[in-house]
Image (cartoon, helix red, strand yellow):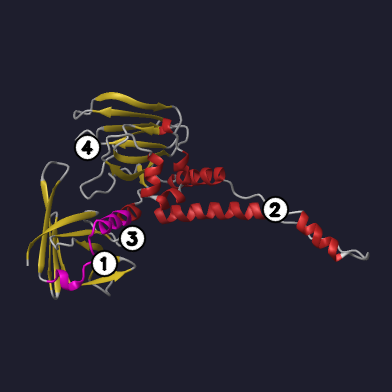
């Protein structure tokens, strides 16, 4: 759906550019039998610039918002939601500057986000940040803080219009502390709690009422670059052959899950969340990214982006953001500690 949305936005922009150029196209001169002074024509052309009607920022903003809403038409989705990252700052931050540094490509593709004003940036300025776009532009929207028992403790936003909003959530030490209620013109009701699932993807509902816009590829690329800035390096095969790595993390139900990976010369073994696989492997480094490729050169190929700490004690694995069509049913990124080998 994200590729469809990108194509739709590009089509809208191209049509706008074509219309603007067509309206500004100068008329062809009418031929006559009279003698023509060519120097006058040149002077006239130089002193009378061709008027054009370029696409304005306002046009781009409107088109990008329309594109998101049109992408939901014909689906059960009542809102498009995107996870945009998290900040642990306890101080006031400039949200747009922070987003511009973190996700410049996403803001360029969807410029309506840059037009969201302070009245539509909801919650304390730290925690996880979510974009919410109701499908119905006339929907009623209410956003509440809730406690562990799902009781409303504070109404932090209410509107009779379905304007896009940015919502800071989940900064109280427990998940699902923010409740979003949307009622469209047909009386359909959506109650949504923005939170990441156990694999660190946006929570989805089985009824398809949420349209996921999250820019996972750009988030991961930014995270990978940040680790490199902290002296992590691109591993070579010799660095990790005959090594093993482990980590564990808490699931939303309070239980613990573990993730294990070990590298032999002729194969890799991975175990996670009750699943496991064994596969031939290789490392491929290109354009500053090291990829761990499993089942290379087969239809079952899977790949992960990988970094190694300079002391060789930790390894970082993320979903492949270079080939973002390759997605696995595993956490979006992990930090594993060396165990032996």
In the picture, measured across the screen, residue 192 lies left or right of residue 139, that is left
Measure the alpha-carbon separation of dots 4 and 1.
Answer: 32 Å
Front-most of 68 and 308? 308
The tag on residue 175 is 4
Q: Which residue is mark 2?
A: 24
Q: Which residue is mark 1?
A: 291
In the picture, measured across the screen, residue 82 lies left or right of residue 8, that is left
User: In the rendering, at what x and y percent does residue 340 appear?
Assistant: 6, 64
Image quarter of residue 270:
bottom left
Q: Which residue is mark 3?
A: 324
In the picture, measured across the screen, residue 13 lies left or right of residue 121, that is right
Q: Is residue 319 above or below residue 80?
A: below
* Contact, mark 2 vs mark 1 (Cβ under 8 Å): no
Of marks 2 and 1, which one's residue comes earlier in the chain?
2
Name which residue lies at 23% across and 56% down: 329
Q: Is residue 159 above or below residue 114?
A: above
SS type, badge 3: loop
Of marks 4 and 3, which one's residue comes earlier in the chain?
4
């Amino acid at each position: 759906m994200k590729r469809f949305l990108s194509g739709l936005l590009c089509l809208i922009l191209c049509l706008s550019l074509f219309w603007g150029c067509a309206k500004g196209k100068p008329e062809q001169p009418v031929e006559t039998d009279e003698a023509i002074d060519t120097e006058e024509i040149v002077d006239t052309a130089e002193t009378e610039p061709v008027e054009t009607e370029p696409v304005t920022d306002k046009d781009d903003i409107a088109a990008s918002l329309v594109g998101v809403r049109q992408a939901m038409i014909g689906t059960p989705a009542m809102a498009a939601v995107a996870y945009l990252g998290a900040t642990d700052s306890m101080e006031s931050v400039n949200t747009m500057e922070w987003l511009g540094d973190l996700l410049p490509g996403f803001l360029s593709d969807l410029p309506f986000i840059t037009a969201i004003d302070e009245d539509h940036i909801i919650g304390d300025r730290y925690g996880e940040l979510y974009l919410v776009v109701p499908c119905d532009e006339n929907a009623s929207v209410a956003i509440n803080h809730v406690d562990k028992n799902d009781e409303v403790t504070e109404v932090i936003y209410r509107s009779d219009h379905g304007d896009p909003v940015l919502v800071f959530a989940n900064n109280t030490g427990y998940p699902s502390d923010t409740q979003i209620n949307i009622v469209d013109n047909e009386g359909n009701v959506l109650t949504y709690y923005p939170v990441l699932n156990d694999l660190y993807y946006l929570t989805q509902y089985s009824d398809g009422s949420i349209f996921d816009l999250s820019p996972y590829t750009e988030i991961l690329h930014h995270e990978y670059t940040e680790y490199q800035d902290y002296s992590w390096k691109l591993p070579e095969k010799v660095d990790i052959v005959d090594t093993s790595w482990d980590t564990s993390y808490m699931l939303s139900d309070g239980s613990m899950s573990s993730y294990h990976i070990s590298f032999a010369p002729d194969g890799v073994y991975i175990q996670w969340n009750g699943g496991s696989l064994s596969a031939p492997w290789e490392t491929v480094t290109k354009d500053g990214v090291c990829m761990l490729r499993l089942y290379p050169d087969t239809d079952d190929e899977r790949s992960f982006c990988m970094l190694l700490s300079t002391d060789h004690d930790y390894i970082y694995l993320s979903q492949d953001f270079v080939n973002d069509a390759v997605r696995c049913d595993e956490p979006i990124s992990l930090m594993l500690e060396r165990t032996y080998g």
